[in-house]
Image (tube, rainbow, N blue to C red):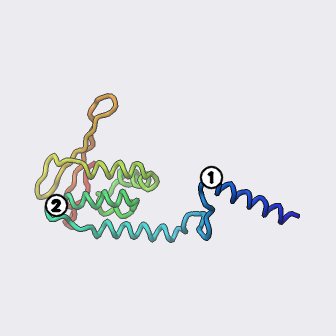
């Protein structure tokens, strides 16, 4: 009696799901993939960002900005470490970025859409500005310069 009752409830559930316009999942996992798969996906995203092709008319600083924005969008925050000057700000912000995709997307937009304010062979400063709901202009400034290895990194933000 107990088995037929469970079967009856399962059949009702399938009918309900079918009536709602969806089909029950057959042989599909109902949970997220294992953490190993997520790590593999993140590693793949990191590789994609690091292997971006530089556009012919793009300078090195803008290419680095593109890579940083790519890592932010991909959620590969750990891959950003070489692109930022170490310090307390990085130590405080990176854990937040790891857990907040909205902040990562916002920061990637700022980095991608910022306009150059000043530039020379050793550095470049950028500004991203927008108008708030109250009509006031707000902006974010950041700068990139070469580190001791000659790599472009964000040094001021």
Comparing 13 with 157, the one in front is: 13
Label 1, secondary structure: give it: loop
Q: Quadrant of residue 27?
A: bottom right
Neighbour tally class for label 1: few under 14, some 14-19, many 20 plus, Cα within 10 Å: few
Q: Which mark is residue 58?
A: 2
Q: Residue furthest top?
A: 134
How many labels sit on residues? 2
User: Judging from the image, what secondary structure is the residue with disc 2 in?
Assistant: loop
Q: Is residue 137 above or below residue 123?
A: above
Indicate left or right for 107 with 26 as reference. left
Image spot of residue 78 (x, y percent): 39, 62
Instruction: Name the spot of residue 5 as percent of width and height, x first.
Output: 83, 61
Q: Which residue is mark 1?
A: 20
Please report the residue visible at 25 percent of the width from the left and 49 percent of the height from the top.
113
Label 1 vs 2, first from the N-terminus: 1
The numbered mark at residue 100 is none
Dots 1 and 2: beta carbons under 8 Å?
A: no
Of residues 52 and 89, the one nearer the viewer is 52
Q: Name the residue rendered at 28%, 30% in the picture.
A: 136
* The quadrant where residue 33 appears: bottom right
Residue at x 69% of width, y 57% of height: 15
Q: Does residue 123 appear to the left or right of 2 in the view shown?
A: left
Locate the N terminus by quadrant: bottom right
Q: Residue 49 location in percent, x, y?
A: 31, 65
**Quadrant of the rendered image containing residue 150:** bottom left
Q: Mark 2: give few (<14), some (14-19) or many (20+) Cα within 10 Å.
A: few
Cα distance, mark 1 to mark 2? 51 Å
Q: Pick whichever, 11 or 52, lies toward us.
A: 11
Q: Position of residue 124 (x, y in %)?
A: 17, 52
């Amino acid at each position: 009696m107990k088995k037929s009752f469970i079967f009856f409830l399962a059949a009702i559930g399938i009918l309900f799901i079918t009536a709602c316009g969806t089909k029950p999942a057959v042989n599909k996992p109902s949970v997220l993939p294992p953490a190993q798969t997520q790590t593999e996906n993140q590693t793949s995203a990191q590789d994609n960002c690091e292997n971006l092709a530089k556009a012919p008319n793009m300078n090195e600083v803008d290419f680095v900005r593109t890579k940083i924005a790519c890592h932010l969008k991909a959620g590969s925050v750990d891959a950003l470490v070489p692109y930022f000057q170490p310090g307390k700000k990085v130590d405080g912000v990176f854990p937040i970025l790891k857990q907040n995709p909205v902040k990562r997307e916002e920061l990637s937009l700022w980095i991608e859409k910022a306009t150059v304010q000043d530039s020379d062979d050793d550095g470049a400063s950028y500004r991203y500005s927008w108008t708030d709901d109250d009509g006031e202009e707000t902006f974010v400034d950041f700068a990139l310069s070469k580190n001791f290895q000659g790599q472009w990194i964000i040094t001021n933000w």
